[in-house]
Amino acid sequence: MAAQIEMDANLAEYVTRMSLRDDEILADLRAETARFPVAHAMLVMPEEAQFIALLATTVRAESVLEIGTFTGYTTLCLARVVGPGGRVVTCDISEPWTRIASRYWARAGVDDRIDLRIGDAVETLATIVETDGPECFDLVFVDADKERSVHYYEQAVALTRPGGLIVLDNTLFFGRVVDPAAQDAATVAIRELNQVVRADTRVEASMLSIGDGVTIARKRDR
Ligand SMILES: C[S@@+](CC[C@H](N)C(=O)[O-])C[C@H]1O[C@@H](n2cnc3c(N)ncnc32)[C@H](O)[C@@H]1O
């Protein structure tokens, strides 16, 4: 049986070089975000954002929801692939981070297809369920406060159309999921999320060990 190969810095750099389709706008956004110490934990890995955009293309996504915008890196990748008639709804509790995001979306010429909602994601999602109804997104990317991961997952399943995808970030949570000493609320919530997805017959799902762990769930057709 094949096993996961060890990923050292050299091999990781090779993967980036062979895989990442970069441009000046994305590189500048990464560089500006990297000036903030939290970027190390918050900013999505560029290869992962590219991969999520590829998934969106694969399901011909025109309507995408992101929970947790930060400086808008994945939002930008998604907005590029939904096309001019598409929309990306993205939500975050922080105005300062998303102000950075907005500048780059405008520079990339995709700001007209991005609908940014500022506020607590729990309330934003409740509003979306009310105004747009269930199953209105082709893909939902969950990447906000980890303590409420199970709630966001449940909302994501409700808001995703049959055949659509739910992408969950940080499902390995810096490796803490397998550390019995890690009992903080976020780690406990991620462990619970992983159990919920594992047992959920509404979806087919796979956990990938790229980045900090990414789980992809496809909502079953009825
Ligand atoms: C890991 S970052 C998101 C990274 C982003 N998806 C990207 O591609 O770079 C998590 C974000 O969730 C936001 N957040 C934290 N708690 C939140 C809440 N209760 N409601 C909405 N957003 C929240 C934070 O402000 C932060 O910007």
Image: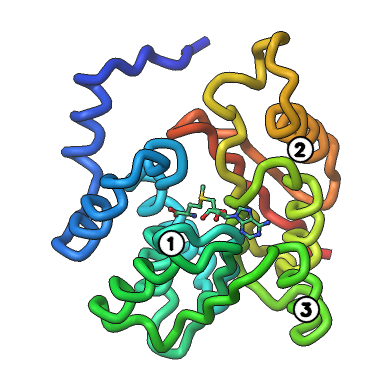
* Contact? badges 1 and 2 (CB < 8 Å): no
On whether ligand 1 comes within 8 Å of the CB at mark 1, the answer is: yes
The answer to whether mark 3 and mark 1 are in CB contact below 8 A is no
The kind of secondary structure element at disc 2 is helix
**How was the colour assigned to the protein in this rendering?**
rainbow
Which is more N-terminal, label 2 or label 1? 1
Which residue position holds label 3? 127
Front residue (pair 217, 186): 186
- Classify the position of the C terminus by image quarter: bottom right
According to the picture, the residue beneath numbered tag 2 turns out to be 193
Q: Which class describes the residues within 10 Å of circle 3: few (<14), some (14-19), or many (20+)?
A: few
Label 3 and label 1: CA atoms lie apart by: 22 Å
Assess disc 1: are there few (<14), some (14-19) or many (≥20) residues with their C-alpha within 10 Å of its C-alpha: some
Q: Amino acid at mark 3?
A: Thr
State yes or no: Cβ of the residue under disc 3 lies below 8 Å from any atom of ligand 1: no
Question: Residue 149, percent across and down?
Answer: 73, 45
Residue visible at 69% across and 34% down? 186
Check disc 1 and give the amino acid type.
Trp
Residue topped by disc 1: 97
Name the residue: 31% across, 52% down. Answer: 33
Mark 2 is on which residue type?
Leu
Instruction: Give the quarter the ligand 1 occupies.
Output: bottom right
